[in-house]
Image (cartoon, rainbow, N blue to C red):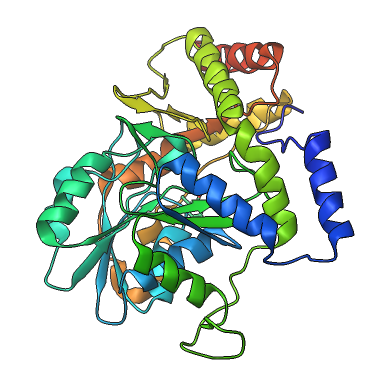
């Protein structure tokens, strides 16, 4: 089976984990601090605060940027549910905006119509590893005094112009097992703001600046030393692994035959895509997409649908009063998208097998 994702754990990464086990300190120690410093430098910001998931990174980012009950937060409707669920965790209300077909990111032309006096923040998502139109989102946030929290879970190393994802204001990353940088579970908050970083550090660890002195009702969102050891070993390899994804995506783009049945993804000008996913669209919609997915599986090629339901159509949000929200692009993309394997452990022969199968299955009878 050609898998959709395959964690690469090399000998130095194994050894780094074994060193933690031998060290006697398994949680929140020197390796976490080192990972934070290295990640901040990599993203090009003053601070990085390590946490134990991307969900925790989003939740804390919202809290430290002052989002709370009575507030609204603008989010794209086509993303992983955590993008919106964390707004609920913060006690606020997500306001869904439609997305674009070309980069799968928030449609910035529709953001201003969604703003109200209660809007406190915007959480754009860099879906599949390519930045959204973050420059325009930043302009809107600046003009309206809103917090900008980038959901960069899928895009460590992606750039937009000269800026790295996660460096625009407050950034939230995930290091889940299938992500471009993989610590099993893990996340990071990035910021240039000393106060934001300071409060995130307090909230991640029980609301304590000093041990057993409770300043706030904080959480246990601490990263383990085991996860940080993997992060430290992988971060120097991230650019090379992203380059391998880029080479695989370029090979797929070259080999996949253009036809009226599928649309292939593109890297937009001025953006460096890190290909967390290589996501084609099956234009005839859900039935044809699902048939292609089944046929590829029968040929030993694993694919996935990210995501089959836009967030506002999830049962939770239907119950919460979003049943009348209609976002046509997000709703259509959910019926069309199919992510093909693009991860760095694939060989050129694997890519050739994938492209040949897709070409054959989508060519006219
Ligand atoms: C776009 C997006 N946001 C948030 C998350 C949440 O990250 P995690 O699974 O580490 O909590 C993920 C990853 O699963 C994601 O893909």
Please tell me which residue is depicted at 46% across the width and 37% down the height of the picture.
128
- Between residue 23 and residue 167, name the one nearer to us: 23
Asked where in the image residue 315 lies, by quadrant, the reply is: bottom left
Q: Nearer the viewer, residue 10 or 342?
A: 10
Where is residue 178 drawn, in percent x and y? 64, 43
Asked if 111 appears above or below 352 in the picture, the reply is below
Question: In this rendering, would 304 be left or right of 76?
Answer: right
Q: How many marks on residues?
A: 0
The front one of 82 and 171 is 171
Which quarter of the rendered picture does the N terminus lie within? top right
Q: Residue at horizontal 62%, vertical 34%?
A: 236
Residue 33 percent coordinates (x, y): 61, 58
- Classify 342 as above or below 19: above
Q: Position of residue 176 (x, y in %)?
A: 62, 51
187 left or right of 64 in image = right
Give the side of residue 118 with respect to residue 58, left or right: left
Residue at point 60%, 76% (across, down): 220
Residue at the spot 26% in from the left edge and 48% down from the top edge: 98
Residue 142 shows in the view? yes
The residue nearer to you, when weighing 224 against 67, is 224
Q: Position of residue 297 (x, y in %)?
A: 69, 30
Let me know if residue 341 appears in the view: no
């Amino acid at each position: 089976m050609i898998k959709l994702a395959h964690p690469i754990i090399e000998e130095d990464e194994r050894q780094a984990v074994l060193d933690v086990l031998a060290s006697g300190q398994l949680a929140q120690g020197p390796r976490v601090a080192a990972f934070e410093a290295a990640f901040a430098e990599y993203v090009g910001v003053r601070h990085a605060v390590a946490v134990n998931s991307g969900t925790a990174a989003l939740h804390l980012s919202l809290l430290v940027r002052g989002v709370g009950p009575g507030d609204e937060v603008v989010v794209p409707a086509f993303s992983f549910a955590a993008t919106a669920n964390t707004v609920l965790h913060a006690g606020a209300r997500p306001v869904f905006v439609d997305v674009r077909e070309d980069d799968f990111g928030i449609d910035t032309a529709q953001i201003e119509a969604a703003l109200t006096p209660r809007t406190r923040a915007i959480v754009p998502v860099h879906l599949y590893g390519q930045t959204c139109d973050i420059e325009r989102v930043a302009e809107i946030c600046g003009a309206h005094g809103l917090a900008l929290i980038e959901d960069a879970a899928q895009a460590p190393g992606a750039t937009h112009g000269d800026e790295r994802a996660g460096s625009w204001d407050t950034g939230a990353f995930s290091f889940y097992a299938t992500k471009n940088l993989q610590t099993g579970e893990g996340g990071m908050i990035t910021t240039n703001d000393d106060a934001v970083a300071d409060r995130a550090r307090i909230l991640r660890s029980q609301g304590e600046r000093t041990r057993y002195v409770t300043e706030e009702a904080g959480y246990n969102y601490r990263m383990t030393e085991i996860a940080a050891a993997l992060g430290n070993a992988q971060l120097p390899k991230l650019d090379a692994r992203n380059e391998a994804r880029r080479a695989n995506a370029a090979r797929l783009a070259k080999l996949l035959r253009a036809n009226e049945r599928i649309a292939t993804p593109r890297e937009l000008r001025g953006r460096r895509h890190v290909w967390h996913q290589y996501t084609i669209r099956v234009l005839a919609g859900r039935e044809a997409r699902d048939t292609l997915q089944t046929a590829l599986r029968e040929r030993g090629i694993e694919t996935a649908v990210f995501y089959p339901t836009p967030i506002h159509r999830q049962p939770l949000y239907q119950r919460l009063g979003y049943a009348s929200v209609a976002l046509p692009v997000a709703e259509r993309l959910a019926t069309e998208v199919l992510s093909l394997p693009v991860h760095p452990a694939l060989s050129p022969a694997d890519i050739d097998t994938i492209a040949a199968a897709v070409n054959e299955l989508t060519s006219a009878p």
